[in-house]
Every structure is written in structure tokens, then in C-alpha cells.
Image: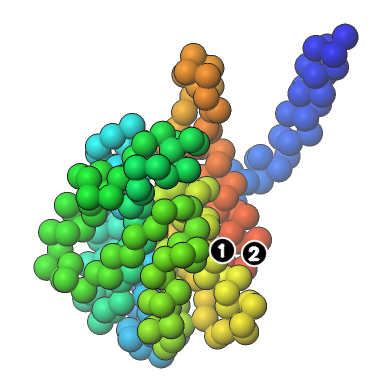
Amino acid sequence: MRGCAVEQNTTEFIAGRETFLAFLNEWAFDLPCEKLSSVVHDAGGPENVAIVCTDMTNAFVSTGRLASARVAAVVPYIVHLFTLAYSLGIRSFALTQDAHPADSPQFVAYGPHSMVGSEEAETIPELMALPFSDRFDVIPKQNLNPGIDTGFPVWLAEHRNVRRFIVVGDCTDLCVYQIAMFLKLRADQYKMDYSVIVPANCVDTFETEYNVARELSILPHDADLLHPLFLYHMALNGIRVASGLVE
């Protein structure tokens, strides 16, 4: 009897979400594109704009158990944004990146990855090849939230002038969401005059199909749903979500 009830509830649940899911799909498709030059102008100059990039490391792009083709696909967009930002005078680049000790509690959920000193923990070569990579401030972190026991709050204190934080990287529903929300909630709590912008073409998350997850006895991860859903949740909380940032 319980199995029948669950099946009925699931059917009703899915049917009841059709309208919202259609809206979500249209909302994500119709996201506005913003001009980075306008962002810079509105902030009062490039010295008041920062790019905050999270977890664009080998572990999530090319090497190891968590490498994702979806995440790798946003690399050219992020490189282009970095290049455009620098051409417009932006010089503040914070790269928050996993650097786990061997006994990291995160390994329970995600398995060993990005251990301190490993190739996986290194910034992707596409970013390091940029001629201004010496401007990057790499900030190690051991959990999804960059504000907990990291150097990020210190970096923010040293960049009090920043009025626009542009967040890029992976994953949309994990570290991107955490860092964007941390910045937004920090602004709300302390009544700080800045805004957070997430260009959708510079973030993504990984896919674990249901059948694969079932075989591996792990939780499935529907990227096509979770990516727009978490973009939407960020927008609900006052974060500016754009389709992308152009010149």
C-alpha cells in the first residue's frame, strides 16, 4: 500500500510542477545580457569592480573523479570575461579554490579531490596562461562556503571600495551559490552598498544521471534542472543574474 501511495504522490507532484518548470525554463532562456562597460561605469570605475572565481581548478575541469564536461565548457567564456575585464581596467581577481587536507570531511560526500599540493588543486592552465595572472589572489578553502575560516573575509576587507562583485565558476548549486549568497547576505547584514552579479554562461554544474547514480548507489544530480533552479534562487535573493557580460 505504501508503495502505491508514493507512486501516486510522485505523479501528482510531477504534474503539479509542470507550470513552474515551464516558467523556469523560459526565465533562464530569457535572461538579459549586460554590458561589462556599463557595470564598470555604474560602479564608478574599474577599481570598484571585482571578479570572484570559484573552483576553476583541474579537479573540476580535467583531472580526477569530479571533472565535468559541463564545467569544462564554460572555460572559454570565463577566460573571455577575464580578458575583457582586464581590458576595461579591472584589476581585482579573487580565486577561491578547494585545497583539502587528507582527512577532509567533504570526502564523505564527494570522495577525495583537490588535496593540498596536488595537480587537481591547481588553477586551470587556461587562466594561468593569461598575461595578467600575476594579479590573481588565490584563496584556498576547505568547504563550500568561502567565508568560513578562509582568507576571503580578509581579502574583502582589503577591497572595501568594490561595488560590483561578478561571480563565476562552479558549481552553480554548490560553491557558486554559496559564494554569491555569502556576498549578498554580507551586504544585507552590514548594509553595504554593493551588488552581486552572476553571468549564467560563466557558471555550470555537473551531471550524474539517475541510472548511473543508481548503479553506483549515489544520489543523482540533474544539471539541466539544478543549474537554472539555483540561478533562479539567487535571483530571488536579489542577486543579478545575466545571460552573460559583453563589452
First reached walking from the N terminus: tag 1 or tag 2: 1
Q: Position of residue 211 (x, y in %)?
A: 51, 16
* Mark 2: secondary structure: loop
Farthest right residue in view:
1
**66 or 9: nearer the eye?**
66
* Mark 1: secondary structure: helix
C-alpha separation, residue under disc 1 versus residue under disc 2: 8 Å
Name which quarter of the figure residue 134 lies in. bottom left
Pointer 2 local density, CA inside 10 Å: few below 14, some 14–19, many at least 20: few
Up/down of 239 relative to 4, above or below: below
Farthest top residue in view:
1
**Picture residue at 47% right of the left edge, 43% below the top:** 105
Tell whether label 2 touches label 1 (CB within 8 Å). yes
Up/down of 41 relative to 220, above or below: below
Is residue 173 rendered to the left or right of residue 141? right
Q: Position of residue 230 (x, y in %)?
A: 57, 50
**Picture residue at 52% right of the left edge, 70% below the top:** 183
**172 or 178: nearer the eye?**
178
As shown in the figure, which amino acid type bears the numbered disc 2? Answer: Asn
Name which quarter of the figure residue 151 lies in. bottom left
- For disc 1, the marked residue is 181
Question: Mark 1 against mark 2, which lies toward the viewer?
Answer: 1
Name which quarter of the figure residue 245 lies in. bottom left
**Picture residue at 57% right of the left edge, 84% below the top:** 192
**Residue 39 visible within the image:** no
- For disc 2, the marked residue is 237
As shown in the figure, which amino acid type bears the numbered disc 1? Answer: Met
Is residue 227 rendered to the left or right of residue 121? right
